[in-house]
Image (cartoon, rainbow, N blue to C red):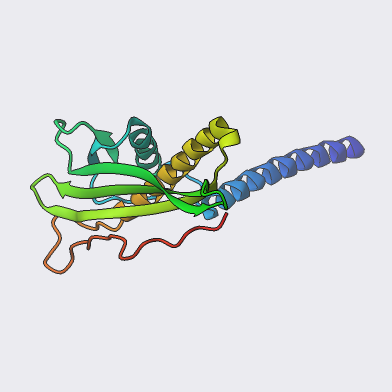
Amino acid sequence: MRKAKGVDVTGKAVEKGVSRRSFLALLGGAAALSACGFQLRGQQDYAFKRLAITGGTPQMVARLERMVQGGSDTVIVKPFEKPDATLNLSEGQGLRTLSLNAQGVVQEYELVYNLNYSLMGADGTLLIPPSAIALNRSMTYSDQYTLAKSQESTLLYNDMRNDAVDQLTRRLATVRSLHPAPGEQTPGVTPRAPLPVPPL
């Protein structure tokens, strides 16, 4: 009888120990995720909670919407849905010749992308004055691979557009108030000099 009791008691103790270890493991895992900053929302605390976007290509606007709504408690709304602020966007792209070969044929291009933006409060306050993000990439070129180079340039432009959107989301986070006091307005940012040619 004593032996049977001992087995029963030990069995229960083991079961309790396993349950306790499982609980502690789950608790530790949750703490680790929190320490790593793993969360779907709340990474940015924008001053505006309802943001409208005007201008920009559908591709860029879609990425911006995903990043803002997926990384904060701010929602994207239409301009007529009473936004707290409106983000105005315009973008442009182009290319310049970087080098020619001995026959005078282009062998390298510089691809350029510009994103212009400003942020206006619902009451007309200019929260971010007209600013710009300028990016560039270099690309070798050959008439023998026209189609491949066209596809490569498309990928490079898309990469620059995504990079610009990433920078823009961080720029929006610098706005601390929808009614900034004098001297607390977010300054505009524009490139002051041509960007250096990037390495291949």
Q: Position of residue 89 (x, y in %)?
A: 25, 42
Image label count: 0
- Residue shown at 35%/42% (left/top)? 68
Q: Is residue 15 left or right of residue 108?
A: right
Q: Position of residue 135 (x, y in %)?
A: 40, 52
Where is residue 1, by image quadrant? Answer: top right
- Residue shown at 82%/36% (left/top)? 8
Q: Is residue 4 left or right of residue 64?
A: right
* Residue 178 in sight here: no
Reply above or below: 34 against 89.
below
Q: Position of residue 179 (x, y in %)?
A: 13, 56
Q: Is residue 162 left or right of residue 79?
A: right
Q: Position of residue 77 (x, y in %)?
A: 23, 33
Q: Is residue 187 left or right of residue 140?
A: left
The quarter of the image holding the C terminus is: bottom right
- Residue shown at 78%/41% (left/top)? 14
- Residue shown at 24%/51% (left/top)? 47
